[in-house]
Image (cartoon, grey):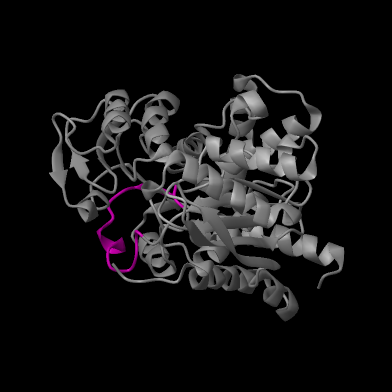
Amino acid sequence: MESYNSFRVARQQIQEAAKILNLDEATIELLIHPQREYNFTMHVRMDDGKVKIFQGYRIQYNYARGPAKGGIRFHKDETVDTIRALACWMTWKTAVLDLPLGGGKGGVCFDPKRMSEHELERISRAYIRAIAPLIGADQDVPAPDVYTNPQTMAWMMDEYETIINRHQPGVLTDKPTQIGGTEGRRDATARGGVITVREACKQLNIDPTGKFAIQGFGNAGQRAALLHEELLGGGKLIAVSDSRAAIYNAEGFDAKELVMHKLKTGSVKGFPGAKEIPHENLLELDVEVLYPAALENAISSSNADKIKAKILCELANGPTTPEADIILSKNGVHVIPDILASAGGVTVSYFEMVQDKYSFFWEEDVVHKTLDQKLTQAYKTVHEAQKEKNVHPRLAAMVVGVARVAEACKLRGWV
């Protein structure tokens, strides 16, 4: 696979949108740079008594529309440019959904699979000690991302509250419900994606009950498998993949059984009745809907012309390169870009912030209904921009997001 610098890709997307919007040079210069970056080391004592040093990051890309919002990754291959790109995309994602938030992202460079539970807790708490002065419910609100989860957020919230010596559950989102989390957060990213697929099928007159495939079978991929049939009234899941295997069955998989197998064994590998296929072949299957739900740059100029899906719903961050966008658009593949398709998670995180602030929590059906309204409206706004500007869907979404952030920057007098 070709090598891409995610932040260079993100900047290119901004400049393309800025050209359509006729933004002035100062505004463009402001939007292509993070507003604040924090780069630090953490010393953590391991179970064997030895101290290890870890590299950490927190980037607040833009906060013109509200507090920075974005996840924390624990990943051995994390780089500052990846964090910059993800923080950048979060800025447009919150703007496309018209949430009163900015964009941020953070990470720690290490392999969490090699750590014990106690070591993960100590690393989580050390991370919060390093960034405590930089975050807060009205400043920067982190959440889970790759290899972090609600338990990680519980440790981090406890450490933060210990430091400030008062209760502030809204400092982090996607917490366990027992300590300020919200109902409906577990499946929010996938639910939002499937809602946008439903809306796309309506607009494009595509059968929503046809075949679909999922690349990446983590939390978002598993939830999409379960929700696709529920929200769209049917569908045949014919292929899924994770880091260990890609599997295929022309007759379709039982989504619930497949998820149970993944949770039990740690992989989709070895699922009864499945045929293993090369990972790259999954992306090229003839399906109505393809969900890329893994890492960045999975679809590039080297494989975009082989994509046969009618709808490509990006549950991952940055799975498609700019060159691939042009090829997909030319070939009639309707891409629902990540800053729209995967925005269900941050939308329900915003609902969690609201609930934490008022200490009044919503029923799950209220969360689902409100999420549906927000994603449906966002899809319509982006689709209208696509028709008006005659551009591909990602550029349309970028135009919507960049325009809203640029307007906030101008109103504040920054440019």
Write down the quadrant of residue 262 in the picture. top left
Residue 216 drawn in magenta: no
Tell me residue 191's x, y (percent): 49, 34
Does any portion of residue 102 appear in the rendered image? no
Taken as a whole, is the magenta stretch helix, strand or loop? loop
Does any portion of residue 264 appear in the rendered image? yes
Would you say 4 lies left or right of 369 here?
left
Tell me residue 363's x, y (percent): 65, 19
257 or 122, nearer to the observer: 122
Query: The magenta stretch spans which residues?
Result: 298-316
Would you say 77 lies left or right of 121 here?
left
Would you say 273 lies left or right of 239 here?
left
193 or 348, nearer to the observer: 348
Write down the quadrant of residue 303 in the picture. bottom left
Q: Is residue 353 above or below residue 286?
A: above
Q: Is residue 341 above or below residue 111?
A: above
150 or 111, nearer to the observer: 111
Residue pictured at 49% horizontal, 70% vertical = 9
Tell me residue 414's x, y (percent): 82, 70
Residue pictured at 59% horizontal, 59% vertical = 87
Q: How many marks?
A: 0
Residue 300 drawn in magenta: yes
